[in-house]
Image: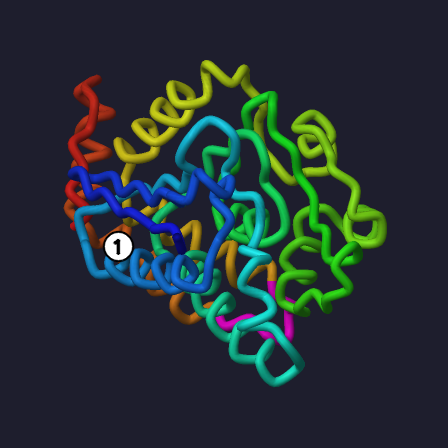
Amino acid sequence: MAGNVTLNLDGTRATITLDHPERHNAISREMWSGLFDAANTIAATPDVRVVILRGAGEKAFASGADISQFSEHRSDGNANTAYDDTTAAATSALARLPMPVIAAIHGFCLGGGLAVALTADIRIAADDGLFAIPAARLGLGYNVAGIANLMSLVGPSNAKEILFTATRFTASQALDMGIVNEVVAKEELEERVDELAGSIAGNAPLTIRSVKLAVRELTKPESQRDLTDVIAAIDQCFESDDYREGVAAFGEKRPPEFRGV
């Protein structure tokens, strides 16, 4: 079986689940396409304010790309280019979602699974999390965009250690490196992610989207930044009903009711 990617839309929240538990949620080519489709569906759903990425079952977030398909889809350089185009389309679509994405990580988070997790804005790991990029044990070339994304989080030295050694790092070590934001007991993972998602969904979506857009541009080299859309998004906040609602709610000492307009 090639596994599935399931998407659940529930009001202001969207949940994407990597569902291939018999292979520890190894991501097949069909699942990469499913991630791309799920991200595009969410991007076209204006009510969504927060996205959760998770893996099915008890063993893994995702154990990597499905190696059983490599002989068919990554047999040589030309075949790998097509495969990489599919994976890059999926990770790019996830990374470019305008609303915050939270990765709820438990168990194995390896290779392509870690690449998916790194598209999230916030990563919460259970204490049984194991992280690695085993490219050097497989002899495959790791794509430049993936290296850049990893390096932007953990720095050049940690990125080299992760890629050179192909070592599995614990959740605690991943926290020290900056791969994850927080580590919780496994039995508390769903509750913590639910709490965090609720907190984000209750805040002003236009403000949050402007911040995400700004961070995206500010992490680029200065010569490549385009702040035009960032400035427009900030201006939109001040022109919104939500801004007036936020100020009024503060003065009236009540929770604001934001509508994203």
Which residue is at a point 30% across and 28% down the rendered structure image?
Answer: 198
Q: Nearer the viewer, residue 196 or 65?
A: 65
Q: Position of residue 68 (x, y in %)?
A: 56, 58
Q: Position of residue 136 (x, y in %)?
A: 79, 57
Is residue 16 something that shows in the picture? yes
Which residue is at a point 16% across and 39% down the rendered structure image?
Answer: 11
Q: Position of residue 4 (x, y in %)?
A: 34, 51
Q: Position of residue 84 (x, y in %)?
A: 55, 72
Q: Which residues are magenta?
A: 220-226
Toward the bottom, the furthest residue is 78
Q: Is residue 181 above or below residue 154?
A: above
Residue at label 1?
Answer: 42
Q: Secondary structure at mark 1?
A: helix
User: Is residue 80 found left or right of 7 in the rendered image?
Assistant: right
Q: Quadrant of residue 130?
A: top right
Q: Nearer the viewer, residue 210 or 8?
A: 8
Q: Residues within 10 Å of mark 1 (few under 14, many from 20)?
A: many
Which residue is at a point 38% across and 68% down the rendered structure image?
Answer: 229
